[in-house]
Amino acid sequence: MKSYDDLLNDCLTTVQEIFPWDLVDELENHSILLIDVSEPDEFSRAHIPDSLNVARGILESACEYDYDDTVPELAAGRERNIVVICRSGRRSALAAHTLLQMGFSKVRSLKTGLRGWNDGEYPLVDEQNKPVNPDLAEVFYTTTLRPEQRKPTG
């Protein structure tokens, strides 16, 4: 049986990652489709400007035509330069792997995710496209496990 980390490590053998500072440089000179696979409530709190929210749960149908979840810009983007984004860079790696399997040819995952983006103090906006305070975003991106979510000891 594979664990979440095993699945992630398998994906990272084929998925290229890009660091936030490299993405900033590329965004200045290249057209890049930013796909944020966070849940809609996460996306509404803070996301990279001009990114599209395509929640991980609907990704496969969002990138195909003729589905209720179709996102035309993504469905038409098989040859586009795409960077997939999430909070930590884990869901985005899994999503990038899926896109590669579905024939998207230029897909990368944002290593360190929005946490790393925020640590670099790069801009984030909310659902109204207003700037998000980096300190407030830090609260969103800090992992807080409840006791029942921790691995049992013993």
Image (tube, rainbow, N blue to C red):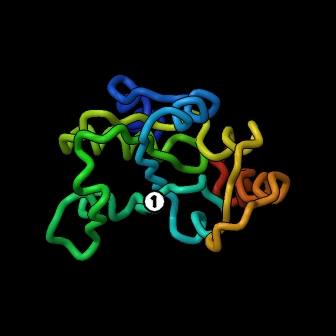
Q: Is residue 85 left or right of residue 125?
A: left
Where does the N terminus fall, quadrant-wise? top left
Crowd tier of the residue under label 1, counting other residues whose Cα lies within 10 Å: few below 14, some 14–19, many 20 or above: some
x 16%, y 64%: residue: 65
Number of marks in the rendered image: 1
Q: Kindly give the residue lying farthest to the bottom in the view shown.
A: 68
Nearest the camera: 100 or 132? Answer: 132
Q: Measuring from the top left, give residue 70's x and y in whole percent.
A: 26, 67
Q: Is residue 149 above or below residue 119?
A: below
Q: Measuring from the top left, give residue 81's x and y in whole percent.
A: 36, 38
Q: Is residue 127 above or below residue 81?
A: below
Q: Kindly give the residue lying farthest to the front in the view shown.
A: 29
Q: Measuring from the top left, give residue 102's x and y in whole percent.
A: 19, 45
Q: Is residue 1 visible?
A: no
Q: Is residue 147 left or right of residue 36?
A: right
Q: Disc 1 marks which residue?
A: 52
x 45%, y 35%: residue: 30
Q: Is residue 117 visible?
A: yes
x 77%, y 42%: residue: 121
Q: Is residue 12 above or below residue 69?
A: above
Q: Kindly give the residue lying farthest to the left in the view shown.
A: 66
x 43%, y 42%: residue: 32
**Could you tell me the amino acid type at mark 1?**
Leu
Nearest the camera: 150 or 7? Answer: 7
Q: Determine whether the residue tagged by mark 1 lies in a helix, strand or loop.
A: strand
Q: Is residue 102 left or right of residue 50?
A: left
